[in-house]
C-alpha cells in the first residue's frame, strides 16, 4: 500500500521523541497522510476552480461528493499523486459543466436532475457502502449504519436540489446542477465501471511507482 | 521545522492521534485516494 514518505518520516520522528509503540506511530502516520493529502488536494483543486472562474461551483461539488464519500465510500486511486491530478481535473470540470448545463432550457435541467436522483438512490441502496482494501469495513453494524447515513445524505441532497429549483437566488441553478452532477459522479464511483476507471488511471505510466516498505 | 516539531511535539502527537482515530470513522474523505487505515482502527 502506498504511504507517503513524508508522513512515515514525520510519524517515525514523533514516535521516537515520545517512545510510542508501533501501533500509535501508525495512527500518527495515517493522520498526517490524511491531513496532508486532503488539505493539499483541497487547496489546489479550489485554486484551479478559481482560475477557471468556477470557485463556488467547485466548492459545491467538493462538499456534495465529500458528503457521499464519507458515508457511501467508492472507488479510489492507489496513488495520492494520481488522485491529486484526478481531483484537480474532476471537480473544476464538474463546476464548468454545471455552469454550462444550468443555462440550457429549465425543462432539460429538471429532467436531468430527476434522472440523477433516481440513479443516486438506486446505486446507494444497492451498492453503498463501498469499501477499499486500504480501509475495509469489517463490522456488519458499521456497514448498516453507513448505508443509513448514505441514504440520509441522498435524501438531504434531493431536498436541496428541489429547494434550489424553487429558489430566487442568482446562482441557484448553477449550484443545483453542481449537486446533480456531483451526485452522478459519486454514484458512478460506487459502480464497477467507476472502479475500472480508477484502475485504468492507476495503470497509466505518468506517476512514479516508488513505494516505501 | 525540526525545532518547531520538537517544541510542540507533545501537542502534535495528541492532535494526530485524535485526528487519526476520528479520521478512520468515515468510509473515506472526499478525495479519490484512501490512506491505509491502521489495523487497530479497522472495524
Image (spheres, coloured by chain):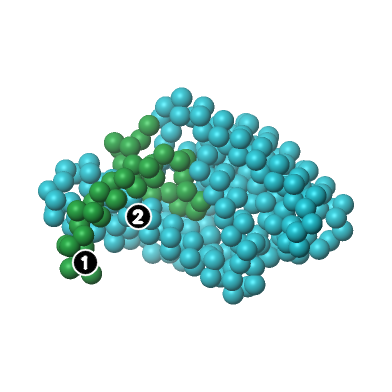
Chain colours: A cyan, B green
Residue A168 visible: yes
To which quarter of the image does residue B40 belong?
A: top left
What's the residue at 23%, 69% (across, down)?
B1
Residue B42 location (% of width, % of height): 35, 35
Q: Nearer the viewer, mark 2 or mark 1?
A: 1
Camera-side residue: A129 or A110?
A110
With respect to residue A46, does A191 lie above or below? Answer: above
A142 on left or right of A109:
left
As drawn, A145 above or below A1: above
Residue A195 visible to an observer of this rendering:
no
SS at badge 1: helix
The residue depicted at 78 percent of the width and 43 percent of the height is: A114
Image location of residue A195, percent across then percent down: 55, 46
Tell me the subunit letter for badge 2: A
Relative to residue A110, is residue B30 drawn left or right? left
- Which numbered tag is attached to residue B4? 1
* SS label for mark 2: helix
Q: Marks 2 and 1, Cα distance to the nearest angstrom?
A: 19 Å
The foreground one among A15 and A134 is A15
- For label 2, the residue is A33
Question: Horizontal placement of A191 versus A137: left or right?
Answer: right
Amino acid at each position: 500500500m502506498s504511504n507517503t514518505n513524508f508522513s512515515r518520516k514525520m510519524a517515525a520522528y514523533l514516535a521516537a521523541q515520545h517512545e510510542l509503540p508501533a501501533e500509535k506511530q501508525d495512527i500518527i502516520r495515517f493522520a498526517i497522510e490524511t491531513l496532508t493529502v486532503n488539505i493539499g488536494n483541497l487547496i489546489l483543486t479550489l485554486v484551479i476552480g478559481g482560475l477557471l472562474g468556477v470557485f463556488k461551483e467547485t466548492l459545491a461539488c467538493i462538499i456534495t461528493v465529500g458528503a457521499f464519500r464519507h458515508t457511501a465510500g467508492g472507488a479510489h486511486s492507489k496513488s495520492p499523486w494520481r488522485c491529486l491530478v484526478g481531483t484537480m481535473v474532476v471537480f473544476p470540470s464538474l463546476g464548468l459543466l454545471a455552469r454550462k448545463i444550468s443555462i440550457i432550457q429549465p425543462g432539460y435541467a429538471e429532467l436531468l436532475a430527476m434522472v440523477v436522483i433516481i440513479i443516486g438512490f438506486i446505486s446507494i441502496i444497492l451498492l453503498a457502502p463501498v469499501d477499499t482494501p486500504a480501509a475495509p469495513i469489517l463490522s456488519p453494524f458499521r456497514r448498516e449504519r453507513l448505508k443509513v447515513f448514505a441514504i440520509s445524505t441522498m435524501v438531504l441532497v434531493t431536498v436541496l436540489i428541489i429547494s434550489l429549483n424553487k429558489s430566487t437566488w442568482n446562482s441557484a441553478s448553477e449550484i443545483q446542477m453542481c449537486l446533480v452532477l456531483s451526485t452522478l459522479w459519486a454514484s458512478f464511483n460506487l459502480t464497477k465501471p467507476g472502479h475500472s476507471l480508477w484502475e485504468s488511471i492507476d495503470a497509466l505510466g505518468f506517476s512514479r511507482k516508488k513505494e516505501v516498505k | 521545522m525540526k525545532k518547531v516539531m520538537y517544541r510542540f511535539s507533545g501537542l502534535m502527537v495528541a492532535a494526530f492521534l485524535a485526528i487519526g482515530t476520528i479520521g478512520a470513522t468515515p468510509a473515506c474523505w472526499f478525495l479519490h485516494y484512501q490512506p491505509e487505515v491502521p489495523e487497530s482502527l479497522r472495524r
